[in-house]
Every structure is written in C-alpha cells, then in structure tokens.
Image (cartoon, rainbow, N blue to C red):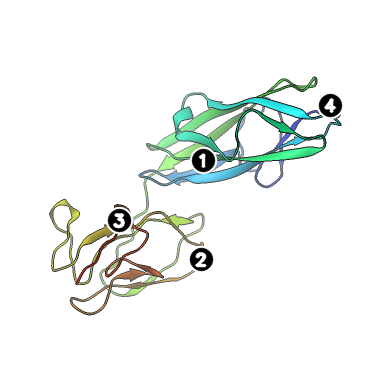
Amino acid sequence: DAAGAPRLLGQNRVPIADGDNTPSSEDLTDFGNVAISGFSLTRSFVLQNPSGIPLQVSALSITGTHASQFSLSGISIPVTIAANGEMAFEVKFAPATEGVKTALLNMTLNSCANTQYEVSLAGTGVLPRLTEFKENGSFSPPPGVNLVKVNAWGAGASPGANNNGGGGGAFVRSNLLAVNSGASYPIQVGSPGGVSTSFGAFITARNAIGIEGGMASTG
C-alpha cells in the first residue's frame, strides 16, 4: 500500500487489500458455513486512516450476486475518520438457501491514494443440524457451532398439528441462543404437572423467556 493509503482490516486485524477478489478464512472475508432458517454470522471490520489528514467515507455498500444475504450495521454514512484514526463496522451473513453466496463490499473515499475500495465476501448456507432429546441429557456444540435454536413442547407435551403440541404442553421456539463449542448444556425433558422442559438456563415450559412470538406458560 502507498504510504498513508486507507487500509481495511478483518475481525482478526489481518489486512485486506483493495481489489482482493478471493474471500479467505485467513482474513475472515469468507464467513464459512452458516445454517439457513434464521441463523446468521456477524463479523466486524475496521477501516484505518494512517494519513495525517481526515478521511471521508461517502458511501459504503454491499453489491453483487447475493448482496441481499449480507448486510451492514454499526455505521452511519457519510462519516469522517480522523487523521491516524480508524472506524469499525459490521457485516452480517444470513443465508436464505443452501450453497455458496458471494458479494462485494464497496467503499467510496476522498483519499488521493485510493478513492474506491472493493473486496469480495463469501459464505456458504447449510442445513441446520438437528439434535433431538426425548429424555434428560446434555448438549455439547460441535466445533464451529456458536448459535442454536430450541424447539420444545412443554412439560410432558409431544409434537402435534400446527406445532401446538399435545399432552398439556405448548410449543415454543427460542430466539437464537449463543453457545460455546465444547461446553456442556443440561437438557431437561419435562413431565406433566411437575418438571419444566429446559435447555441450560433457557426455560421452554413455564414462563418461557427469549422466545419467538412472545411468552408461553404450560401446566
């Protein structure tokens, strides 16, 4: 890079050159495998201004074949980065279907060294992995898994028509829950009138919290 030229860094602070059209796990422009059906992965990027004068970012966008499955957050455009300063923003990958997805991250700058900055992004949509529990146990997320959704039929319930459940228990589906690969999360399968169904600290029977569609309470 020319002295004082803007520089983009990945979440791990690895530099990403302007015009880099090969998404990589090294600089985290390749988001890897992300499950479809509501799952997503967000990564942060940093734009550095190593020059002695302010840098204005007049446009920041995502374009390309699967642009709608990538989104920007954490920044309002236009923005000015102070001399020798930096600015962070986030890109979220939320695949709608299976397969490789690609897009371009574009920035318009007032730098004499570089007025346009463009890098390629990629990720792969995969089917969610299903683990079913019919009795008490524990769940240890495999490597690379950091989000889960819990579908549960309340105390003593069983799947029924329209996912309403049966046996006195309502169906609930959790929001995305953050988990740690290799950790162990206790699973409790409820019984009618007594024990609530739960996943770790997330209760899916009586007074369920953090669920899609509001609160739920079962007997």
Residue toward you, 40 or 115 = 115
Q: CA distance from mark 1 to mark 4?
A: 30 Å
Tell me which label, 2 or 4, sits earlier in the chain. 4
Depth check, mark 2 against mark 4: the one in front is: 4
Q: Secondary structure at mark 4?
A: loop
In terms of image quadrants, where is residue 61? top right
For the residues labelled 1 and 4, say whether their Cβ atoms are less than 8 Å apart. no
Disc 1 crowd, CA 10 A, few/some/many (<14, 14-19, 20+): some
Q: Residues within 10 Å of mark 4 (few under 14, many from 20)?
A: few
Mark 2 lies on residue: 182
Q: Who is closer to the viewer here, 204 or 83?
A: 83
Quick check: 56 left or right of 130?
right
- For the point 32% across and 53% down, the residue is 212
Q: Amino acid at mark 3?
A: Gly
Residue denoted by label 3: 214
Return the residue at label 4. Answer: 2
